[in-house]
Image (tube, coloured by chain):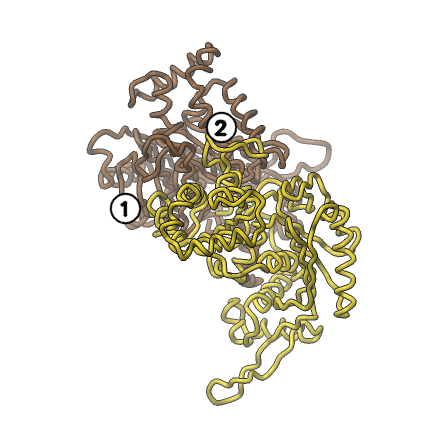
Chain colours: A brown, B yellow
Amino acid sequence: MTSTPTAGARPDEVRRHNRTALLRRLHIEGPTTRAALATELGLNRSTIKALVDGLAETGVVEERVPRARSGAGRPSLLVLPQPLAAVVLAVDIRVEQVAMALVGLGGEMLGRNSWNLRGKAREPDEVITHIIESMRVLADELGVRTIAAGVSVPGVVRRSDGFVHEAPNLQWTGVPLGDRLGAALGIPIRVGNDAEIAALAEHLRGVARGSLDAVYVSADIGVGGGVISDGATLSGTAGYVGELGHMVVNPTGRHCYCGSRGCWETEVGEVALCRALDLPEGSPRGAVVAELRALSAAPAEAERKLAEFSEWLVLGLVNVVNAFSPELVVLGDLFTSLPVPLVKRVGDEVGRRSLVSRAIGGTRILASTMGADCKLIGAAELAFETVLGAV
Amino acid sequence: MTSTPTAGARPDEVRRHNRTALLRRLHIEGPTTRAALATELGLNRSTIKALVDGLAETGVVEERVPRARSGAGRPSLLVLPQPLAAVVLAVDIRVEQVAMALVGLGGEMLGRNSWNLRGKAREPDEVITHIIESMRVLADELGVRTIAAGVSVPGVVRRSDGFVHEAPNLQWTGVPLGDRLGAALGIPIRVGNDAEIAALAEHLRGVARGSLDAVYVSADIGVGGGVISDGATLSGTAGYVGELGHMVVNPTGRHCYCGSRGCWETEVGEVALCRALDLPEGSPRGAVVAELRALSAAPAEAERKLAEFSEWLVLGLVNVVNAFSPELVVLGDLFTSLPVPLVKRVGDEVGRRSLVSRAIGGTRILASTMGADCKLIGAAELAFETVLGAV
């Protein structure tokens, strides 16, 4: 329901709009025929022909005879996006490591590297310098030029200019990350909150593909959430996304660095999981995951140890579902290691206690299947969003 | 951040798009000159001339010499929307009464009526019959034809077809309100959740005017919320909006009909306010408001009586701000009668405890100034959204 006066669209914007829509289709869904493009985009064949011919001339797409032929007659040519026609840099800054990749049009990772963060290496200056150097090495090795970059940060980020207001688990405050990288690399930079970026990845290439209204929630040291609403990622004032991990679920719970107490993060984040599992706070990630996997084979023990954790997980999810009415909630990071029966029970309980879930015929709650590259993939898509129109 | 492949725009859609944008501008912001329209909509003067001439020919707008002239030379003509060129029906169904109005292009109320709901009169069939009859009487009196209707309902509503899943305080369940009214009246009907509709009204014509990211929260018997995100009302799966009143704020609180306990509604709704004010549950609205006004003159007593209520109000608002990152929260209905110093303290406390509020430089928390017509005004705008393109 758009309600503000919108500016008028001029005819000269239409061709560009259609070209971007076609390129986005090929980039996300992969190669297809001109006929299929016409049907999917609702454009006539001559418009499609003009657009594809134009893109083929500049080497952005190629047309090829498909290997498998269907039916008799002349085979329909496949339109394929060319990875090297547009290459972006994707960066995933986490508490324990930074991962980077160069990603080509169509989503293929052309090259990647990563390094661990310890001590001084976590200072913003060090990280920024390292990103810039690594990108140059990667681009030289591959002989490509990058045209934009997307960066995932576990913190509160202003989307408009990539200013990191606060990334508590990195101990970063007030870092103009977007401006710094932009000045050094000379390309458009977009910085996003890690959960927002993961939500984008799940929506475009993961289990939330095709879901117009979905929420991604993940537990790392922090707990974060990203919201897809009507097919687009949701943000608020100045491009700041919400911080679902700081919804208060337990008003008498532990104090949180944010100024509240009993935040969802303090009740279901990695530290809370360690407590529930009788592991020392700050145990290595591998130990937490191993313990969760072991519990999958011991249902009674899992139930006992994770009862309180599950209750807070349910409560936060009820609030998320009642706030955003999503058809799907994707659980990421540490949550993907939770015992499957527990996730099932949590989902059932959310359905029972959420008015909205009952109204919309149930909200599915699924574990992410994207694995560790989720945020890298999302960061690449954030970058592509900026430049697909100019490829 | 639009992320799904979008369909292409054809040149023949552009004129229509521009015409609707111009009409929406006049409808919401009122009369202005062609020159101002060109500037605001980013269109050139010949496009504006063609659009205004077309609208003047069909009587949708009129051009007039302004009364006050600025400067020398030929005065710029004002373009005025003509109220009778497009008339919609607005209906506000509340627990205690139904209010209706016929609203013309530009937002003027041309006629209205209302009736109280008691006992049998609250049955869906009775209400629907009464709405249909009243609308015919109103339209006959005024000699106008209505082209669409918008209806506000205090419940969980599917936006796509106006199906009322549940309106607990009306004791309605599974009422196909949109279909029933549409079949009887033969015009497009849109039905919305009352808080969603109030948010739309505040965004277009109230204190949230100009705010791209705002949340409206109100207490009646129920507590509801509506979200404006990036200038448009937010909804989720199948058009169901969220139910902010059913976010759990107090996990050990009272049981709620929704299946949870300690919902925001059970802690800060009218029943909770009656408890805090030592009034019997179900006291008339006037008594609750009078008691709140009396407390405005007795700060110490207000503090004491409303301490617990305030804490739950703060907690829910922290969650709302952390979830949606709004620059503004508008408090409606009963909340507008809260003592001003209390609202101020609540706002300060939300700022202290919300990570997101600090990041975005503070979230303003203001009482609505629209009064009792807020939902009627919003319902009219919901109807206009559907038909402005076809006027």
Give the amino acid type for the residue marked by disc 1 in the picture.
Gly
**C-alpha span from label 2 to label 1:** 33 Å
Is residue B4 visible in the rendered structure shown here?
no
Residue A114: x, y in percent? 31, 30
State which quarter of the image contains the C terminus of chain B: bottom right
Residue B170: x, y in percent? 66, 44
- Residue A363 is marked as none
> Which chain is home to disc 1?
A
Q: Residue at x 72, y 55 (%)?
A: B188
Front one among B357 and A190:
B357
Q: Give the residue number, with chain letter if any, for mark 2.
A: A314
Q: Residue at x 36, y 30 (%)?
A: A253
Residues indicated by labels 2 and 1 sit on the same polypeptide chain: yes
Residue A323: x, y in percent? 51, 40
Front one among B276 and A184:
B276
> Which chain is home to disc 2?
A
Q: Residue furthest left?
A: A120
Q: Give the residue number, with chain letter if any, for mark 1.
A: A174
**Circle 1: element type:** strand
Residue A6 figure quarter: bottom right
Q: Residue at x 31, y 20 (%)?
A: A284
Q: Residues within 10 Å of mark 2 (few under 14, many from 20)?
A: many
Mark 2 or mark 1, which is nearer to you? 2
Residue B238: x, y in percent? 63, 41
Mark closer to the chain start, 2 or 1: 1
Residue A263 vertical position relative to residue B291 in the rendered view, above or below: above
Q: Residue at x 25, y 40 (%)?
A: A124
**Circle 2: element type:** helix
Front one among B336 and B57:
B336
Give the amino acid type for the residue marked by disc 2 in the picture.
Val
A287 displayed left or right of B50:
left
Is residue B327 visible in the rendered structure shown here?
yes
